[in-house]
Image (tube, grey):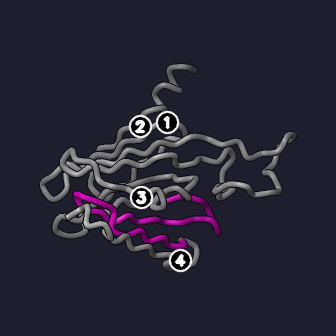
Amino acid sequence: MRIALAIAALMVGAAAPGAPTPIAPTGETRLVSRLDGVEVSADLLTHELPIERPGGGASPRRTNNCTYSRIPCVLLESLELKVGGQSVFVPRSAFGDLSDVGSAALRRIGAGQFALTLQGGDAAESYKVELVFDKARVRERILTDKEAGMVAEKTVYFDVSKAFN
């Protein structure tokens, strides 16, 4: 049993660009792709959160970001992006509300621009989040409601401080 837990604690995906990689429910999942001639990586750290009440079933009061499409809930604790070995600034608001993430994929979307696609939830709670980034920072987040098939939120991150020039 301990061997199986150790294997599940670190999942490394080196799939073809754009191909989804399953996310470990607890521990680290690492995606690595060679895109636009440079290595691009994403490290996701997750943990399970029990959301059932004693005796079984989901708690009637929702007090967290869980989609309640899976028990226990899986929360995305941290997300690190790198381009060419250099860290990319990722605001916590880009991932802090995501839970029950099932898969992730990296792809190139333009010259020097990349996207991390995260898919999670189930049925009415299913979603897709695309984080658009370059070598310095995340530029936008697009959340699509998968059941409705339409964009539900779009956040654009500006470099107000000019720190990323």
Mark 4 neighbour class, 10 Å CA radius: few under 14, some 14 to 19, many 20 or more: few
Amino acid carrying label 2: it is Met
CA gap, disc 3 to disc 2? 24 Å
Mark 4 and mark 1: Cα distance apart in space: 29 Å
Residue 15 seen: no
Task: Confirm or deny contact between disc 2 and disc 1 (CB under 8 A).
Answer: yes
Q: Is residue 103 visible?
A: yes
**Horizontal side, residue 25 vs residue 154: left or right:** right
Report if residue 136 lies within the magenta region.
Answer: yes
How far separated are the C-alphas under marks 3 and 4? 19 Å
Of the numbered discs 3 and 1, the one sitting upstream in the chain is 1
The 10 Å Cα crowd at callout 3, few under 14, some 14 to 19, many 20 or more, is few
Give the CA distance from mark 4 to mark 2.
30 Å
Q: Secondary structure at mark 2?
A: strand
Q: Three-letter amino acid code at disc 1?
A: Gly
List the residue tagged with mark 2.
11
For mark 1, give the secondary structure. Answer: strand
Q: Residue at x 57, y 78 (%)?
A: 148
Residue extending farthest top: 2
Q: Are marks 3 and 1 in contact (CB under 8 Å)?
A: no
The CA span between labels 2 and 1 is 8 Å
Q: Quadrant of the N terminus?
A: top right
Whether residue 78 is in magenta: the answer is no
Image x and y of residue 104, in percent: 41, 54
Read off the residue under disc 4.
152
Q: Looking at the image, tell me whether mark 4 or mark 2 is earlier in sequence order.
A: 2
Mark 2 surroundings: few (<14), some (14-19) or many (≥20) residues within 10 A: some
**Tag 3 residue:** 91
Q: Residue at x 25, y 68 (%)?
A: 109
| Tag shown at residue 4 | none
